[in-house]
Image: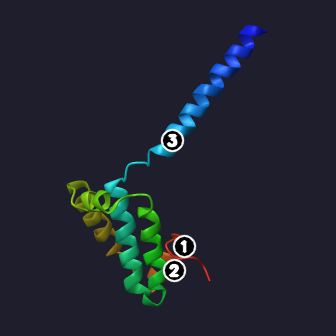
Amino acid sequence: MKASFIAVCATAVVVLASALADTRMAPRLNAASLARVEAVTSYCENVDPASDSEYVSRVAGAMRGHSDSEVQSARNSSEYRQALAQANETLAKVAASSAVRACTRSGSRPSN
C-alpha cells in the first residue's frame, strides 16, 4: 500500500512538472506555417476587401504569444520565403470566381 502511494505521488509530481514546463515555454514559431497563413490571408484580403479586418485578426491570432523579434526572424528565414513563394504560386491558380468561397471555406473568414 505504501509503495502504491509513493508511485501515485511520484506520478503526480511528474505530471505537475510537465504542466508547468508547458506553460512557461511558448511553442516555437514555425516559419513555413506563418508564411502560409500570411499568404492565404493576404490573398483573401485582396479578393474580399470588405472582410479585411477579419483576415488581419487571423494573422494576429497566429502570432499571439510570439515576440516581434521572433516573428521578424521567422519572416527573414529562407524557410519562410520558400513557403511564401510556394503558397503564392498555388493561390495564383485559384479561379477568381471561387476565391471568396474558398477563403470562407478554408476558415480564413468566418461564415456569415
Amino acid at dot 1: Arg
Q: Earlier in the sequence, mark 3 or mark 2?
A: 3
- Relative to 81, does residue 9 appear above or below in the rendering? above
- Relative to 112, does residue 17 appear above or below in the rendering? above
Q: Quadrant of residue 11?
A: top right
Secondary structure state at the residue bearing disc 1: helix
Which is more toward the observer, 63 or 107?
63
Residue at the spot 39% in from the left edge and 71% down from the top edge: 40
Cα separation, mark 1 vs mark 3, equals 32 Å
Secondary structure state at the residue bearing disc 2: helix
Q: Is residue 52 left or right of residue 12?
A: left
Q: On the image, numbered disc 1 is attached to which residue?
A: 105
Q: Which mark is residue 22?
A: 3
Amino acid at dot 2: Arg
Q: Is residue 71 left or right of residue 110?
A: left
Which is more toward the observer, 81 or 86?
81
Q: Quadrant of residue 32?
A: bottom left
Mark 1 or 3: the one toward you: 3
Q: Residues within 10 Å of mark 2 (few under 14, many from 20)?
A: some
- Relative to 39, does residue 77 appear above or below in the rendering? above
Amino acid at dot 3: Asp
Q: On the image, numbered disc 2 is attached to which residue?
A: 101
The reply to whether callout 1 and callout 2 are in contact (CB within 8 Å) is yes
Q: Is residue 83 left or right of residue 24?
A: left
Residue 94 seen in render: no
Residue 79 seen in render: yes
